[in-house]
Image: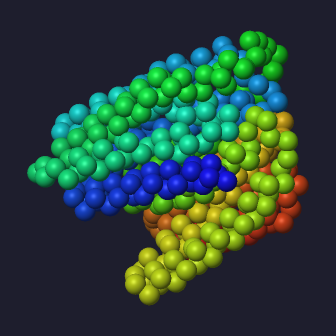
Amino acid sequence: MKSIFRGPALSLASQMIGLVQLVVLLVRTGANEATDAYFYLFNIGMLPIQVLIVGVMYPLLINSERISRRGIRRIQWGTPAVSVVLMVGGAGYLYLNGRLPVELWPLAVAALVNAIVQALLWFRGVTAEAAGNPRWNAAIALPANALATLTLLIPFHSAATTVVVMVGGLVIGNATLLLFAVRARLGREVVESAPVDASGRTGAYWFFTKASVGYVGLIVLQSLAVLLPAAAVTLLNVGVKIVGSIAATFVNAVMPQMIHHQSDSIGPSKRFLRGLVGVLAGASALVVAGVAIVANELVVPAICVGLWVVASSSSAIAQRMSFRFLAPSASRITLIVVPVVVALAVVSSVAPGFQLVVLLCAYAAVDGASAALLLFALRDRAMSRVLAVTCLALAGIWILALL
């Protein structure tokens, strides 16, 4: 029983420190060009990790269509290489849009180095997670967030210098944890248990397509935020951080013990989903009520984030269940979701009423629609309907925001 709570405890500590880091950063520098560049580049650096390691390797480690050792090694070293290419492209996009002045070039370099180290670290953590050990991944950001928060206490005079040094703290923290993971040979048993050959299997292509479409779509949504006034990227990522922290604490740190490469029952996961959705929906309603009292103008964004929390956590659970209990080709049922939502967001971006709330709805709709479709395929009709209603509510807010 203690092992069940150890993962969430580590994740909660990591996420809390991450939130403290975010608050201290915004207090020290405010939401500005430097923080926009940091959040944008950080998300670009996470893209190869989310697509190749989390989106392809992890499901193939727990699915019946196992990935080969050769495939694992390709992902281990290919992910950092892709990170370099994307980070250079992301920095170029910011520069061409006038959002990366010369004083922020060191930030781009530091973010690139951090992306490489993160990719190697996440590879280790995810292989351990596939074996049913969520503790490393639960605490994967803990050293980096802690050290980055400490650097923010140093009284630099410019926002650019503050953010660059903070990213340097992330690099050192991630590199230190990576060293311990390598020395502990983390995930070695999972790699060695993989089949030598996996020729003729198509699972990797399905998972790669699904992950690529999904995460590239989210980067497009991030890029739309760049078109909004300065600080919009930062504010959007505050929502991303809140939602991601909740999912990491209550889903990613628990589900690996229910869903792993030896799981044979989906029942516990379905019961966990129902209980968690009830708790998150109630907590979100209380938060919205509190926001209505304290800052009435933020009620609509608060509602969006509350719906997003429910949708994101449901999607995370549904995806893990589908990785284990559905064929890889089942990924096709969600492939249309992201292009449709992103296309609607792009069209909305030229409307006079385009604002941050629209992007919050788009993010939440991606998770909500994906969860509804996957749960329907997993024969959980009741929860599928709950997520469908969530999507309808988001669509209503989206339309009203544009009017």
Identify the residue shown where x is 18% and y is 44%.
161
The C terminus: image quadrant: bottom right
| Picture coordinates of residue 215, whole percent (x, y) | 58, 41
Q: Residue furthest left?
A: 157
Is residue 91 positioned above or below 69 on the image? below
From the viewer's perspective, is 176 left or right of 101?
right
Q: Is residue 254 visible?
A: yes
Residue 134 appears at what percent x and percent y?
60, 42
Give x and y (percent) for residue 320: 72, 45
The residue at 62%/69% (across/down) is 280
**Residue nearer the viewer, 242 or 12:** 12
Residue 296 image-quadrant placement: bottom left
Q: How is the image coloured?
A: rainbow
| For residue 82, above or below residue 15 | above
- Residue placed furthest toward the bottom: 293
Residue 366 rendering spot, x and y as whole percentages: 64, 54
The residue sitting at 29% across, 39% down in the picture is 169
Q: Is residue 28 left or right of residue 175?
A: left
- Extreme-front residue of the structure: 2
Q: Quadrant of residue 284?
A: bottom right
Depth order, front residue of 95/60: 60
